Amino acid sequence: MAWLGDVGFFIKDAGEAVSTDASAFAPGMTGPAPTQGFSLNRDEAQNMLTQAKATRDDLRALTPDAEKLTKMKPPADEIASNAYNAAYIGAGGSPGAGGYGAGHIQKEYAYMVELIERLERALGITEDTDQQAGSAVKAVSTDTGLA
């Protein structure tokens, strides 16, 4: 969870003061509160969680198509098609434009998985499916080497 570092989410009800205790940011968290973060009411956090899950699902659906594009072949065996294809799928150890695009989608997916985990933790929600999704991100980035 490197990209969020010490950013926390504090879920509060109207009129509630912001706490300096870490347990207010996530159940089970100890020590001082994160040095930076977001204070949301429960409805805002639930809406954000719903949007984050929809975005995660969209990114998951894009992944296979993005990976297929990194394996495309030139339409003809001639100089211009071969040069374009090499720039897109990569050559000489470079992932090419398509590889960078697929890797970017994987990173966005991992970002959304972490955001969802942190929001759920702040809301006191845990779901096995999100834990499985986190494992899937690690497996995808290890298998393809694009992330």
Image: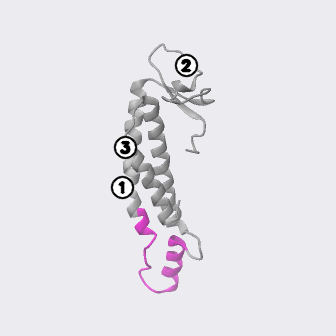
Q: How is the image coloured?
A: one colour
Q: Is residue 23 visible?
A: yes
Of callouts 1 and 3, the N-terminal one: 1
Q: Which residue is mark 3?
A: 128
Residue closest to the eye, 98 or 46 = 46
Of callouts 1 and 2, the N-terminal one: 2
Q: Which residue is mark 2?
A: 18
Above or below: residue 17 compared with residue 48: above
Q: Position of residue 81 (x, y in %)?
A: 48, 80
Residue closest to the eye, 62 or 78 = 62
Quarter of the N terminus within the rendering? top right
State whether the magenta stretch is mostly helix, strand or loop. Answer: helix
Proximity of marks 3 and 2: CB atoms separated by less than 8 Å: no
Proximity of marks 1 and 2: CB atoms separated by less than 8 Å: no
Other residues around mark 2 within 10 Å, as few (<14) / some (14–19) / many (≥20): few
Q: Secondary structure at mark 2?
A: loop
Q: Which residues are magenta?
A: 66-90
